[in-house]
């Protein structure tokens, strides 16, 4: 039994690592880097603010139907993108996955706008609570804490390196920017002189 427990423990550890990796990939790269800015933009639009007011007066079954349809569509697009990746059609998979992100951001906004009515369904509320409990469990894993610490260290290193590159090449007083401006001025004058000669 000890051997099987050891194997089970290792498989569970691998499963936890995969879950943590996918969650961090989604949270840090896809959500923070791409989806969240789109979500914030959607939330700031006047049309969505008006739409949010209308949602408050819409029947809960209508909101559930719209939310479920969009969510299933987004998940289906994600699965199809995964199929494309497995088949080696990386470009198709990447385009499809990127295309679904704005819709996913809208689905998040729709959930927030109609949360009260969606959670009024007992099964939906139960599913939501289980999902949140699962995410909390994932964040409590030691592997998650270690990987987040590592990600934070990588972010700090990247920011420092980017600051050095920015100060060196893209500051107004930097030699690279001066040379770029000089080249631009030369090309501009060269074009003007060429036009004059043609006349």
Image: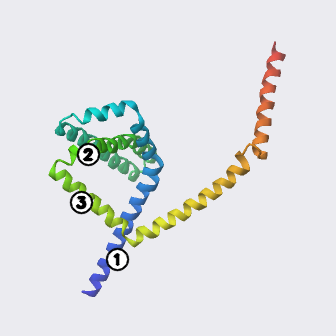
The location of residue 142, given as percent across then percent down, is 40, 72
Residue that label 2 marks: 115
Closest to the observer, 125 or 170: 125
What residue sits 58% from the left and 61% below the top? 156
The location of residue 191, given as percent across then percent down, is 78, 24
Tell me, yes or no, whether the two marked residues, 2 and 3, touch with CB atoms within 8 Å.
Answer: no
How many residues crowd around disc 1 within 10 Å: few (fewer than 14), some, or many (20 or more)? Answer: few
* Total marks placed: 3
* Horizontal side, residue 127 vs residue 186: left or right: left
How many residues crowd around disc 3 within 10 Å: few (fewer than 14), some, or many (20 or more)? Answer: few
What residue sits 43% from the left and 69% below the top? 145
Q: Earlier in the sequence, mark 3 or mark 1?
A: 1
| Structural distance between the alpha carbons of marks 3 and 1 | 25 Å
Q: Earlier in the sequence, mark 2 or mark 1?
A: 1
Q: Secondary structure at mark 3?
A: helix
Q: Secondary structure at mark 2?
A: helix
Closest to the observer, 62 or 18: 62
- Residue positioned most to the bottom: 2
Quadrant in which the C terminus is drawn: top right
Query: Can you tell which quarter of the image residue 19 is in?
Result: bottom left
The location of residue 85, given as percent across then percent down, is 40, 51
What residue sits 37% from the left and 65% below the top? 139
Residue that label 3 marks: 130
Colour scheme of the rendered structure: rainbow
The location of residue 47, given as percent across then percent down, is 36, 30
């Amino acid at each position: 039994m000890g051997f099987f427990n050891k194997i089970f423990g290792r498989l569970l550890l691998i499963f936890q690592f995969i879950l943590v990796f996918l969650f961090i990939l989604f949270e840090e790269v896809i959500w923070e880097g791409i989806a969240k800015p789109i979500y914030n933009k959607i939330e700031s639009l006047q049309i969505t603010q008006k739409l949010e007011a209308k949602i408050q007066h819409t029947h809960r079954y209508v909101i559930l139907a719209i939310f479920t349809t969009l969510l299933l569509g987004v998940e289906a697009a994600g699965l199809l993108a995964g199929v494309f990746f497995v088949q080696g059609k990386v470009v198709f998979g990447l385009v499809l996955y990127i295309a679904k992100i704005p819709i996913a951001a809208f689905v998040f906004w729709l959930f927030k706008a109609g949360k009260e009515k969606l959670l009024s369904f007992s099964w939906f509320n139960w599913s939501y609570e289980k999902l949140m409990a699962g995410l909390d469990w994932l964040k409590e894993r030691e592997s998650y804490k270690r990987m987040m610490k590592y990600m934070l260290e990588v972010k700090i290193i990247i920011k420092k390196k980017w600051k050095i590159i920015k100060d060196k090449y893209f500051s107004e007083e930097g030699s690279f920017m001066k040379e770029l401006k000089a080249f631009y001025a030369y090309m501009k004058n060269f074009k003007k002189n060429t036009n004059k000669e043609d006349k």
